[in-house]
Amino acid sequence: MAYGLLKGKRGIISGALDENSIAWKVALKAKEEGASLVLTNAPVAMRMGAIRELADTTQAEIIPADATVVADIENLFSRSTEVLGGKIDFVLHSIGMSPNIRKGKEYGDLNYEWFQKSLDISALSLHKFLQVAEKQDAIAEWGSVVALSYIAAQRTYPFYTDMADAKATLESIARSYGYRYGKLKNVRVNTVSQSPTKTTAGSGIGGFNSFYDFADKLSPLGNASADDCANYVITLFSDLTRLVTMQNLFHDGGYSSTGISEEIIEVLNK
Ligand SMILES: NC(=O)c1ccc[n+]([C@@H]2O[C@H](COP(=O)([O-])OP(=O)(O)OC[C@H]3O[C@@H](n4cnc5c(N)ncnc54)[C@H](O)[C@@H]3O)[C@@H](O)[C@H]2O)c1
């Protein structure tokens, strides 16, 4: 059911790779709620083609941008304001990648060039989005920026290696820029810390199925799906959350506040 929560709003959605992507679900819901959209992803992801289908469904323009390249992001924001006919009301940062995870490097054997790549793609890119937007004055007053994070920013998950450090940086950037952009333009910046979710980025992490099941058994409400995540993100883009900023918001079925559950005890007792 749609509520018209984003009626008349203009948004940029990054990171929709395929129909499992969290960003894909956010784009569909944002459209349903009345927004007009621009979709963006790295040029290399474009070549895989699925985003075209989403663009057709959501009547969105696609503007390719490598999230590590400032010139691409400048083009993304300036073209988006042109195409959408005004300043941007919301931005989804749904971008993450670690070459070290992809290549199975453990935390004591990281390749530092790849580590910098992980940080650049998964964290600094949020700063780049915000700095470009500020310089172009591209985000409307009371606009909303949401980036996706994971609880490994606060607690150790050995298999998450350098992405844990990237997520900690991402959340810090959201706080620091949230202060600045709040003072400047009443723009809010938050991170949503999502349950493990079966997507390309998620499933690429070593032991994913085990920690997916563990999280599901620990959380009183079970793991939050990508669809549920999209619903939550839509509320953060809407005018109903105008005073929420600089927060890391857990969207995890209660996982982050649970010590142990009966289901986990049962498994251990077996
Ligand atoms: N899946 C999970 O378990 C989970 C849990 C918590 C948070 N997250 C976060 O959610 C976000 C979205 O991931 P997802 O799970 O939907 O997976 P996904 O693989 O569908 O999305 C990741 C996206 O990042 C894009 N990307 C990678 N490098 C890029 C670059 N240089 N420039 C622009 N885009 C680039 C990819 O093309 C892809 O679309 C990520 O930040 C991820 O860390 C995922």
Image (tube, grey):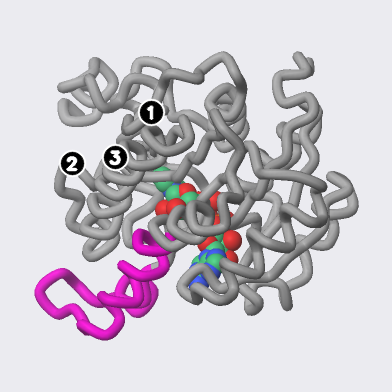
Q: Secondary structure at mark 1?
A: loop
- As measured in the structure, the alpha-carbon distance from the residue carrying label 3 to the one carrying label 1 is 8 Å
Q: Is residue 202 visible?
A: no
The amino acid type of the residue labelled 2 equals Gln
Residue located beneath label 2 in the image = 154
Picture residue at 32% right of the left edge, 30% below the top:
247
Residue 32 in the image, given as x and y percentages of width and height: 80, 29
Residue located beneath label 1 in the image = 245
Picture residue at 73% right of the left edge, 62% below the top:
79
The amino acid type of the residue labelled 3 equals Arg
Please rate how many residues cluster around mark 1, counting C-alpha atoms within 10 Å: few if below 14, some from 14 to 19, many from 20: many
Mark 3 / mark 1, whichever is N-terminal: 3
In this rendering, would 182 be left or right of 262?
right
Residue located beneath label 3 in the image = 175
Q: Secondary structure at mark 2?
A: loop
Residue 165, image quadrant = bottom left
Q: Nearer the viewer, residue 12 or 217?
A: 12
Please rate how many residues cluster around mark 2, counting C-alpha atoms within 10 Å: few if below 14, some from 14 to 19, many from 20: few
Q: Quadrant of the N terminus?
A: top right
- As measured in the structure, the alpha-carbon distance from the residue carrying label 3 to the one carrying label 2 is 15 Å
Q: Which secondary structure is most common in the magenta stretch?
A: helix
Q: Nearer the viewer, residue 154 or 137?
A: 137
Residue 264 in the image, given as x and y percentages of width and height: 24, 26
Q: Is residue 221 above or below residue 56?
A: above
Mark 1 / mark 2, whichever is N-terminal: 2
**What stretch of residues is rendered in magenta?**
98-125
Q: Is residue 207 visible?
A: yes
